[in-house]
Image: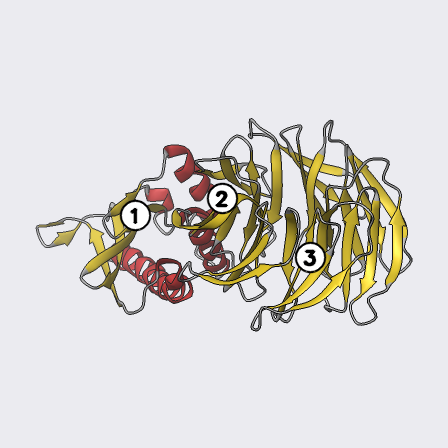
Amino acid sequence: MPSEFSTFFVDKLVEYLFCVHVIQRNVLKYKHFFNWKSFTFVTKLIIFTKYDKGKFSKPQKCKVFFFVIIKKKVVRMSTITTNEKKMTASQLVRFFIFKHKIEFSEKEIKKIIENWLRILNIELGWINDFDKIIFKYAKYFELQKVLKGHKYEVTKVKFSVDSCKIVSTSWDKTVRIWDVESGTQIQKFVGHTNWVIAAEFSPDGNTVISCSNDKTIRLWDIKSKIELMCLKVHIYSIADVKFSPDGKTVISVSDKDIRTCDIHSKKVIQTLTGHSHSINSINISPDGQMIVSTSYETIILWNVKLGEKLKELKGHDNTTNDACFSPDGRFIVSCSCDKTIRIWDIESGEQLKILNGHSGYVNAVRYFSDGQRIVSCSTDKTIRLWDVKTGNEIQQLHVPDKPSYVDVSRDGSTIVSSTWQNIHIWR
C-alpha cells in the first residue's frame, strides 16, 4: 500500500475512532431526548478511492456512517469530507430521526461547519464542540403533549427542581400539578378566591407557593393537598412570588413593593421600595444574594441582605414583563412590550445585546441551564430559542394561541409553555 494512502488511512482511522467514541457517548447522553429504551449502535467507515494496475489512487473522500437501531427503525448520522485540504476534518451533514427527516439549510450547515470544522487537525476539543452542536443544532424541539384541565387563561407554568413535575396557575382560581412524562394531572389545589397569578415549587419539591389577586400567598403540601399556610402581607393584588434558594423565605411583589417573609414565623422580614410603577415580576439570583424586579421601563437589582438598590437597568422603551439571572449569576436577560429581549452585564450594568425577532409583546424569557441559550415567548404566537453568544435565533416554535409564559427544564431537554386553557410540552 503506498505511503500516501497509508497516511490518509491512518488519519481517517484516527478520526473514525474519535467519531465512534463521541457518537457513542452522545447516544447514551441524549437517548432520553428521543425516549430510546434499548438500541444497537453500528458504525461503518467507507474510504472512496480507485485501484488501477496494482496501485491505489489518491483518496478523494471518506464517509463515516453512524446507525442507531431502535426496534428495527434507524437513526442515522454521517460525516463526509471531499476537499483535499480538509481531509482530516468532518462536517455534520444530516440527521435522521426514524422516518422523520430533518434537513439543515445551507445557512445552518454553514453555522455548524464554522463552529465545528478543524482544518487539517483533530484535537480533543473537537469532542466538546460536537457535544454542543448535537444539542444546539440536532436537538430541535417539537410539540409533544397538550395538557388540558384549566377552564380559563393559564397564567404561569414552572418546572419542579427535578423537572419531573409542572405547576400551573390560572384565572379559574386553581393551582395544578402535572406529571411531565405522562401528562396527567397529579393534584389540584382549591382555595384562592380570585385569579391565581403565579406559583413555584419549593427547593425540596414537597410544597408549592402561590399568589393571587385575592391578596393572599398560600403554601400547599403536594402529597396531602392540604393548605399549610395563608399569608396576608399585601393590601393589593400580588403579581409574583418566589422561594429563596434555601426555601426558608418567600419573596413577593404587590403594587410597587417587594416583601420578604419568613415561612416559619410568617412575619415580614423586609420591604424593598424604589419602583415608581407597579412591579410585574421578580427573580432571585442563584446564590440568593440578589433580586431582579421589572416594572414599566425599569429593571432594578437589589441586595437581599442589605435591602438596598444596587442598580437600575434602563433601555427598554415599553413595559418590561420579565427578567431573570443567568445560571452563573453574571448576567440578566429581560423582555418587554417593546418586542425586544436584552442581555445585561450585572457588574457594569451595561446592555450587551438586543435580540430582535418577535413581532409582538415578549411575555417571558428564561436561560437554559448551560447559559448559552435563551427561550422566550410572545403574543406573536411563537416561542423562540436564541444563541446567547451570537444573538441569533436558533429555532421558532409556533403556538395556536398567544403564550403567556415559558419555562425550561433543568437538563434543557423540555420546554413548557402556557396559553389560553392549555399547557404545551415541547421536546
Q: Nearer the viewer, mark 3 or mark 1?
A: 3
Quarter of the figure with residue 158: bottom right
Q: Residues within 10 Å of mark 3 (few under 14, many from 20)?
A: few
Along the horizontal axis of the image, is 169 left or right of 70? Answer: right
* Circle number at residue 80: 1
- To which residue does mark 2 refer? 421
Q: Nearer the viewer, mark 2 or mark 3?
A: 2
Position in image of residue 157 (x %, y %): 56, 51
- To which residue does mark 3 refer? 328
Q: Note whether residue 382 is visible.
A: yes
State which tag comes first along the sequence, 2 or 1.
Answer: 1
Q: Note whether residue 330 is visible.
A: no
Quarter of the figure with residue 14: bottom left
Q: Report the front residue among 398 and 13.
A: 398
Q: Residues within 10 Å of mark 1 (few under 14, many from 20)?
A: some
Along the horizontal axis of the image, is 94 left or right of 154? Answer: left
Distance between the alpha carbons at the discs numbered 2 and 3 = 34 Å
Q: Is residue 363 above or below residue 283?
A: above
Element type at marker 1? strand
Q: Is residue 165 above or below residue 136?
A: below
Q: Report the front residue among 172 and 413.
A: 172
Q: Nearer the viewer, mark 2 or mark 1?
A: 2
Q: Residue at x 51, y 58 (%)?
A: 125
Q: Is residue 279 above or below residue 219?
A: above
Element type at marker 2? strand
Pointers 2 and 1 in contact (CB under 8 A)?
A: no
Element type at marker 3? loop
Position in image of residue 180 (x %, y %): 46, 60
